[in-house]
Amino acid sequence: MKPSIQWLRHLIQALVLAFVFLAAAVGWYGSNLDRGNVDRVLESNSAPIATPVLRAIDNTARPQDSPLAVLQRNDIAHERLKNVTGNSWSGKWFGVSLTDPLAGVESTISQKSLTLALLTGLAIPVGFTLLFGRVFCSWICPAGFIFEIVAMLRNVAGRFGIDLKNMRIWRGHKYVLLTTGLVASALVAIPLLQYIYPPAIITREAHHLVHSSLNNAAGITENSQGIAGYSGVVTSGGSITSGGSGDSGQNGTQPAWGLSAWAIFLLALVGIEYLFSTRAWCRYVCPGGALYSLIGWRRPIRVVRSAPRCTHCADCVPACPMGLNPMADQMGAECDNCAECISHCPDDALHLRFTLKTHAPVAPQKTTLKTTEALSV
Amino acid sequence: MIARRKMILNTARIGASTCVSAAAMSLLWHNTTRHPSSHTLLTEPAIIRPPGAQGEADFLSACIHCQRCTDACPRGTIQLASLGDPAPYGTPFIIPTERGCDLCLECTDACPTEALAPLEDKRDVDMGLAVVDDRLCVSANGTGICGACHTACPLKNDAITQGSHNKPIIHEDHCVGCGLCEEACIIDGTKAIRVFSKRGVA
């Protein structure tokens, strides 16, 4: 067991997840600086998380203790913040524009033209995937990290003798979903897969959660009022109400929670994965994972098994988060180069290598393996 | 025989999978798109999109709901639609009554898909058109002298000129629909000057 690379991987995943929330807070900071809302939160210490987070952002963005006037210092902050917008779905991280390939392909297909801005954003992620395969799934994806934690919880439950079901279904579902989604997006001219793609859901829900809680901390109520009122519902008193469905007079004074029904979708996935099928979304359904698999199919950097060293101990088989069998050389397109099998190999038989030899995308061939667990693809 | 059985199994799998995912996609499309209802009042302003947005259909086909425009907006003008908002979920929109746009065009730079097309000049923005309700405007109905909208207008003397008692006169060719006039309007509740989208009802 060589755990060091796994700790590094989990650290990167955790940083990305934290960055998604932090990026939402940075976005709120930039949008509310000139209006004095940021200073309002910084001065009031009522918000336990919001105030320290905003103070940290403020310390890096705005020059402190400077003789400049407030508005000039704000301008400097805006200039600096231009390098951090968006999130892991599409964003500018420290000056580099990055867009998820699924977002790019979907948007290109639904608007039926490829824009230059999209191409520059896609260059790095696609190039990385061509080289390293589906590494987004194992090293970056914030939803994959959450699902991995769920899988760990399943293992903990197993140690306490709780026997959880592990259903395995056909892996090809995700390619079908990707195809259907892209065809549907082209037909209705709206990118549809972004609604159900968990990393994109997380970025949107993080945005809504962070913005609504920071708005509450700053005492802004206008965000939750007037929106329904704008579409024609105006009370007799002339003030715009917070909703068209009878809850007039509240004027958005109640704190908004901010999450939407898609958070429930995400929670349902977590529940399903915990109770019935480990890593089910990533293995069988994820359209983004399918796209990354296709792009990274012929990646030169992959896990390679050295047959003479392998003692067929099968330690790598339950370790694979994607449910593959490294012992039968199932490191095709589905493998996301997470290196879990390498970390679990006691015989030093598995290595990340640069090789131009490729495996079949999915290799469900029967082998002489005794562990039936691993074989059902 | 085994190969044949495998082929049948795979065909069945693909067929079932296609049916389920196609059903899911049509459900998604139906539930996430705003279908205009027959009893929508004509006085209701359609969704105001950030600068650079083309027609509503073109905008929706390109937008990937990434929040880069909302993050880039230094004024907090651009909001991201959550459930219950007038715009389809996840898309950016503007409520000029709350915050107008000062036409800095940072959002068009930030957009990764050109759903907000890059613009050179703020005069090329076409978000909507301001309309004055003479019954509500104090300068127009004779109850006072105001001029707040003219003061706030970034294209003043082109988009808004003033008549007697500072009554605002909108010039359709120059007004870009930024909404700063609506934000500045002193009337509580429904403002006397409001921005209406020219981009077609979504």
Image: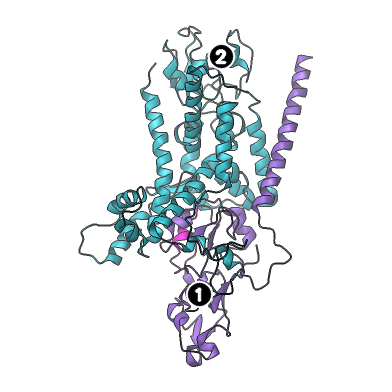
Chain colours: A cyan, B purple
Q: Would you call the spot at circle 2 few (<14 residues within 10 Å), some (14-19), or many (20 or more)?
A: many
* SS state under label 2: helix
Q: B176 or A117, which lies in front?
A: B176
Q: In the rendered image, which residue does mark 1 sit on? A: B182
User: Pointers 1 and 2 in contact (CB under 8 A)?
Assistant: no
Q: Name the residue under label 2.
A: A328
In the figure, A298 relative to B54: above or below? above
| Mark drawn on residue A332 | none
Q: In which quarter of the image is the C terminus of chain A?
A: top right
Residue A47: % across, % down: 36, 52
Is residue B3 rendered to the left or right of residue B74? right
Residue A112 appears in the picture as rendered: no
Name the residue type under label 1.
Glu
Q: Give percent across and percent down for residue B61.
A: 62, 54
Q: Give the range drawn in magenta.
A: B104-121
A20 or B172: nearer the viewer: A20
| Residue A142 on image: x %, y % | 47, 38
**Label 2 marks which chain's residue?**
A
Mark 1, other Cα within 10 Å: few <14 / some 14–19 / many ≥20: many
Of circles 1 and 2, the one toward us is: 1
Q: Where is residue A19 in the image (x, y as percent from the top left)?
A: 40, 43
Front residue (pair B166, A364): B166
Spatial CA distance of label 1 from label 2 is 68 Å
Q: Residue at x 57, y 71 (%)?
A: B128
B107 part of magenta stretch: yes
- The answer to whether any part of residue A157 appears in the image is yes
Query: What type is the residue that disc 2 sits on?
Result: Ala
